[in-house]
Image (cartoon, rainbow, N blue to C red):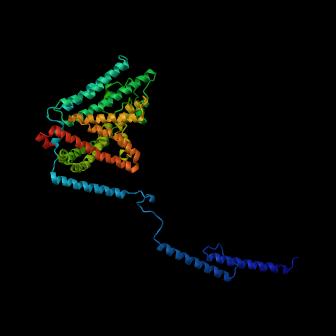
Amino acid sequence: MIDKDDFGPITRNRRRATITSAKSETVKVRNGATAAASDLTSGPKTRESLTKALQLNENSKQKCDRYDKMSCHKLQESMLSSASGFKNYRGILNWCVVMLVLSNARLFLENLLRYGILVDPIQVVSLFLKDPYSWPAACLVIVSNVFIFVALYTERKLAMGSISEKVGLLIYIFNLTVILCFPMVVVLKLPSITPVGGAFALGVYTILFLKLYSYKDVNRWCRERTQVKARSLSRSLSCPSSPSVSSRMQSHVSYPGNLSLRDMYYFVFAPTLCYELNFPRSESIRMGFLLRRLFEMLLLTQLLVGLTQQWMVPIIRSAMKPLQEMDYSRMTERLLRLAVPNHLIWLIFFYCFFHSSMNFVAELLRFGDREFYRDWWNSETITYFWQNWNIPVHKWCLRHFYKPLLRRGAGKLLSQSAVFFASAFFHEYLVSVPLRMFRLWAFMGMMAQLPLAWFVARFLRGNYGNAAVWLSLIIGQPIAVLMYVHDYYVTHCQDDPTITEAL
């Protein structure tokens, strides 16, 4: 048995422990902590102390809330700082558009007040024809069918084995050489062909030259595959593109079944420079899409003519005297004045030709590959711009010129330089021959792209590189325009008052 007295010390110890725990809880609550639970068996003094502690805690919270409401600062970066992470500049872009519209509206109004209305549709017709009963440029385009027949006849003979590969190559060399030389001689020797008509005819012959060169290469690849007992031409011989469902459903054409007039003329009119036996085709012609592109072509063509006559021609006229007197300050001012309308006309021409016209032809022919351009406006290097602004030409250069040079052991730099050299040649060919003068401004402008491309890629990155690309487009083209117009004026128009007035 245990004595009663033995419980005495134990009970006292328990009471002391309870009082101590109550005190410690009171201290914790006063320091801002929340009480986990209240001891209901404690005395009234303990409950009062807990109540007071809770009231103090609530008062302190209210004070903190009032302080937070009064505070207006926090740790943050300025919105235009790169560290802020802010990227929504839509309002600034809209402001730039509004300012651009207002500034050009002022220039347009100033032009009207100074020169009046200069748009003359009849003068546009005279740019193509000197005599309404004589159409030399159109006749020159019709004659180009002879070279198409020669290429098709040569391929049929090669497929049958009637002529050797060497003889076929000699025929092609002669045919392609005549394609470039014949229209050049006609334009230079026939005074009835206007510069605009001559440029149009030479452009058609240049496109035909590139198409027939591709036609020759692809058919030669087919014969090489046939010799190694390949039954059909793989799409790997063509520009890489994934066949669509509709193209798989169509009949697959194999060599030499492609050597027909229908296949040849489909390729001639198709908006591409690279030949294939089986082009990707769309399912049907969308009349709404076709009519929209036609409307854009008509509207933008009129806009191009109006802007050229109303805006560019007066500036070019006023630039002749400073160029003759070599007044560099006024020449610079005229150059900057010409840069805006020239660049705007170039952008409209790009959309009209590469989007509206080529999509119109592609829709009419149900041509499936509509990648005529990529995002060249985001170019951070000169090389990226030239690779993406004209995809048909880029594909042709890559497939028939650049890669063959690499396979034959040429280095990348040499191959790129050769591509720029060929491009410079055709630019000069399309400008100097119709103007009947050779000044090499276009050639030198294209070759200058090589050191400029190296400089931009080496020293300028990101937005700075993109700005350099835009600057080269906005300033570079007007320089070439002024040089050619000045030389043409000095060569052909200086002694003729009627031509001077028309200019």
- x then y, percent, for residue 48: 64, 82
- x then y, percent, for residue 479: 26, 44
- x then y, percent, for residue 450: 35, 40
Residue 237's place in the image compared with 35, above or below, is above
Please identify the residue farthest to the bottom as the structure is shown. Answer: 45
Relative depth, front residue between 442 and 157: 442
Any part of residue 342 in sight: yes
Q: Residue at the location (28% across, 45% down)? A: 348
Quadrant position of residue 363: top left
Residue 98's place in the image compared with 207, above or below, is below
Quadrant position of residue 391: top left
Residue 307's place in the image compared with 370, above or below, is below
Q: In the image, is 300 to the left or to the right of 412?
A: left
Q: Residue at the location (28% across, 55% down)? A: 100
Q: Residue at the location (37% across, 56% down)? A: 90
Please identify the residue farthest to the top as the structure is shown. Answer: 162
Q: In the image, is 34 to the left or to the right of 367?
A: right
Any part of residue 365 in sight: no
Q: In the image, is 227 to the left or to the right of 111?
A: right
Quadrant the N terminus occupies: bottom right
Quadrant position of residue 260: top left
Please identify the residue farthest to the left as the structure is shown. Answer: 497
Quadrant the C terminus occupies: top left
Relative depth, front residue between 387 and 26: 387
- x then y, percent, for residue 140: 22, 29
Q: How many marks?
A: 0
